[in-house]
Image (tube, rainbow, N blue to C red):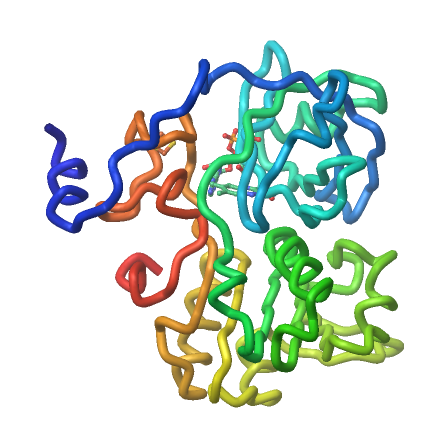
Amino acid sequence: MSETQKARMLEGLAPRPLMPGNPYLPMPARVREIITETATIKTLRVVLEGEGAMERFHFEPGQVAQLSVFGVGEATFVINSPPSQKDYLQFSIMEVGEVTHALHNLSVGEQIGVRAPLGNFFPYEELRGKNIFFIGGGIGMAPVRTIMLHVLEQAKDYGSISLLYGARTPKDMSYQYELDDWLNHRDLHCTLCVDKAPEDWPHREGMIPNVLKELAPSPDNSVAVLCGPPIMIKFTVEALLGLGFAAHDILTTLERRMKCGIGICGRCNVGSRYVCTDGPVFRCDDIQAYL
Ligand SMILES: Cc1cc2nc3c(=O)[nH]c(=O)nc-3n(C[C@H](O)[C@H](O)[C@H](O)COP(=O)(O)OP(=O)(O)OC[C@H]3O[C@@H](n4cnc5c(N)ncnc54)[C@H](O)[C@@H]3O)c2cc1C
Ligand code: FES
């Protein structure tokens, strides 16, 4: 037994799930729409093929998919459309290497493979009645988008709902076509910030942790949900702890390279936890040592 498996048993973590059928077999899907978000990020809207396939497919906000480009490989992406969107599944993809390059070069109508849904999800039922402060940095806005839209659909069940979305420059902001809706949404307090602002930028200037300290959300009956690059998560968690948020009330997603996506290969471990089955959503008190 591997050291990770021993540590998992000692911590009482769930054994790997038994999945029906062949868990490595991707579902066929077709690209329906491509949106160029920024110089490095594209959004793909894809439709599962087969009669009733989209209606039968269920996922929870925060769950991920392994997308495969045939002949190239497979990589992990969060499904960033809300579960109520039954026409397509949306993925926002930053080009960093081979698979993401191939995904960026797809055309509308081309076929890809989808293994999903994988991983855990944001515990939105447990968060009912609480104030939720969403924080998205760069491509990290993708997982925040799915849970935020899901929560906004049931806004009356939650306290105040806020979003702080930051990017390097205005041109690095994804979902530009939705920002006005978010800024004017009656149930959302939305703040946008960029590290370096041009003169005509009407929103905040500054790094996310600093803008967060200026906004100073109250930790009372509140949870923070944040996703972004590792360095942003580290300093934003520090800022939230400084504002009085308990580590248990800070939820984040972790990225580790995945292979099997189903808790078998041991590739994605964070201590004794697997990002693919115990995550990608974690409460900070469980993973603080790894931030
Ligand atoms: C749970 C989860 C959710 C994710 N969601 C998204 C998403 O919604 N949108 C998105 O754009 N990306 C997301 N990613 C990251 C994405 O999976 C990687 O960028 C992708 O696998 C890179 O594949 P590639 O073949 O293009 O790059 P590779 O050729 O494999 O790598 C290129 C470079 O990126 C680095 N890299 C690759 N994968 C990772 C990783 N997981 N973490 C850190 N560095 C990495 C490599 O070290 C290398 O420097 C997610 C990852 C995980 C684990
Ligand atoms: S990707 Fe294989 S155990 Fe997580």
The residue lying toward the viewer, choosing from 24 and 194, is: 24
Residue 194 x %, y %? 70, 70
- Residue in the image at 35% along x and 45% along y: 278
| Left/right of residue 37 with respect to residue 63 in the rendered view | right
**Quadrant the C terminus occupies:** bottom left
Q: Quadrant of ligand 2?
A: top left
| Left/right of residue 143 with respect to residue 196 in the rendered view | left
- Whether residue 138 is visible: no
How many numbered markers are drawn? 0
> In the rendered view, would you say 17 is above or below 232?
above
Residue 110 x %, y %? 79, 17
- Residue in the image at 67% along x and 16% along y: 28
Quadrant of res 111 = top right
| Left/right of residue 186 with respect to residue 241 in the rendered view | right
Residue 6 x %, y %? 11, 39
- Residue in the image at 54% along x and 39% along y: 64
Quadrant of res 116 = top right
The residue lying toward the viewer, choosing from 201 and 112, is: 112
- Whether residue 230 is visible: yes
Residue 224 x %, y %? 51, 72
| Left/right of residue 73 with respect to residue 251 in the rendered view | right
> In the rendered view, would you say 157 is above or below 90?
below
The residue lying toward the viewer, choosing from 55 and 140, is: 55
Return the residue found at the far top. 71
